[in-house]
Structure formats: structure tokens, C-alpha cells
Amino acid sequence: MVDALPWFATQVVPLAIAGTVLGILVYSRWSRRGQPNTFVGEIPAGPAPRSARDTMFSGTTDGIGWHLAVTNDNCEVDDGLATRRANSHAATTWGTEYLRAPGAMLVMNIPESATSRTASNEAGGTLAGLAGAAARFALQSYAAQRFGLARANRSSWKRAQRVAYAAKHFSTRFEVFSDPPELKDRLSAGARDALVRAHAAGVSMLWDQDGLALHWPLAKRTDEDIEAAAELGCAIAHALEDQAPNPA
């Protein structure tokens, strides 16, 4: 069994406090216009930019209205010397209210390292080396850093919510937490393949009562990047929709 604790110790836990603050700053609250599973009316503009360094986009792709926010947060980095230097963190969040989840699903991106990817395919996944409370803290921190503290806290993420997929090309790159567990069936093979193709860019996903959201730890401002983000998000939304159970 590969010990996954070092990855969380270096990637998630030290950033938890900063991630909580960042989650509040970058959280995009999307208004609930229209009926569940249907987008009606104008595309929500999302939050107002905090500065000229923040950029908001919106559009419609394949019949789905969406919005995309590129955020920048400046911080000071201590080099261990007498001086400090400024650093900037950019992130992109794409979202739509087109399809709301009958529950919640978090798709965690596992970094491209042999240890992490091997651990993700073991029984229990990358959280197997963590105690229950530590695992919950790691999951909540991961969701808050990417999708905002308020949205992350609407769900109570636990290690026991981890669901497995047989295809190793997906399961070694992503871990999925689903509440209820049967929600995993909505993430079709096509949707999983689309996420795998976008894995290297660091994409992660949250599908909950507020809709579908994708996050990248980088800025997407070019027309090509924005179009690609919208196409990925809308393809996943349609795939989730297509897998909806037939009404009795």
C-alpha cells in the first residue's frame, strides 16, 4: 500500500487555511433562475470583478448558458531572507445552472506523480492513509480551495463517499466522491474520457444543487481557451443529462 499521506501533507493540509480564505474570495455565487435542470432567462453575470485583474465571460454553447471567471490573487512569499516578494495565483472557474444534481459529486484531480497515481488506484484511494477526521478536512479543503467555502460546506464530504470506476486510465488520474453513491452512474464513460483529456491542465469538477462547475489552477483568457473550457463543460453537462434515469 502506497502511503498517500505525504501528498496531502504537502499539497492540501498546509494550504487549508489559505485555501479557506481563497475560497471565499474566488467563490462565484450563481443565481437560481429558472426551474431545476433547465436554464431560463439571461445568462447570470456572476460576481462583479474585484479588480481590473479579474475577468468575467459568459456565453451559450450547445444550448447551454454558462459563465467563466478568471481570478487573480496576490500574496507575499517569504524566501527565508530579509526580503519578501510578491506572487500571483490565477484560477479559472466555469459554471452553468443548466443541470443541477440530485445530490453532490466531487471529482478530484490527482497530480501526475507515480506515488499519487499509484495510491489513487489502491483500495481506499489517496485518503487511505488519513484518519477519518483528517480525510474529511482534506476533502473540504480541496473543495473550498477550488469552488469556494460556502459551496463546499453545503456538502459534508467524507472518505466513505469515494466511488470507484474500473477503467484505470480514469481512476489513476481522478478520484470521485458521490452522495448518494448511485450518482456515480451519471458520469458516463464519455464524460470520464473528456476529463482524462483535460487532466494535465489540473481540471477538477463539482456537480451539486447549484449546477455544474469546473476549475483549473490557471488563467484561461484567450478565445481558444474559453471556447475549449465551454465545450468541455457543456459536453459533460449533456453526458450527465443523458444518463438521467427514466421516470417511473
Image (cartoon, rainbow, N blue to C red):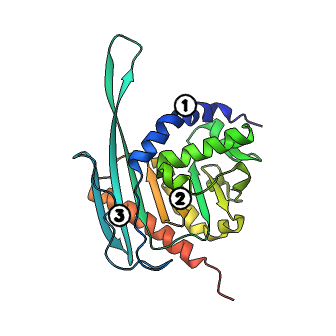
* Location of residue 69 (image quadrant): bottom left
Mark 1: which secondary structure?
helix
Q: Residue at (66%, 45%) from the top-left corner? A: 136
Amino acid carrying mark 3 in the image = His
Does residue 219 lie above or below 225 as drawn?
A: above
Amino acid carrying mark 2 in the image = Leu
What residue did someone put label 3 on? 67
Question: Is disc 3 surrounded by few (<14), some (14 to 19) or many (20+) residues within 10 Å?
Answer: many
110 sits to left or right of 19: right
What residue did someone put label 2 on? 206
In the rendered image, residue 21, in percent from the top left (x then y), is placed at: 44, 40
In the rendered image, residue 125, in percent from the top left (x then y), is placed at: 71, 46
Mark 2: which secondary structure?
strand
Q: CA distance from mark 3 to mark 1?
A: 31 Å
Residue extending farthest to the top is 82
**Sequence-wise first label, 1 or 2:** 1
In the rendered image, residue 230, in percent from the top left (x then y), is placed at: 38, 65
**Sequence-wise first label, 3 or 1:** 1
From the viewer's side, name the closer residue of 64 and 156: 156
What residue did someone put label 1 on? 14
Q: Residue at (55%, 31%) from the top-left corner? A: 14
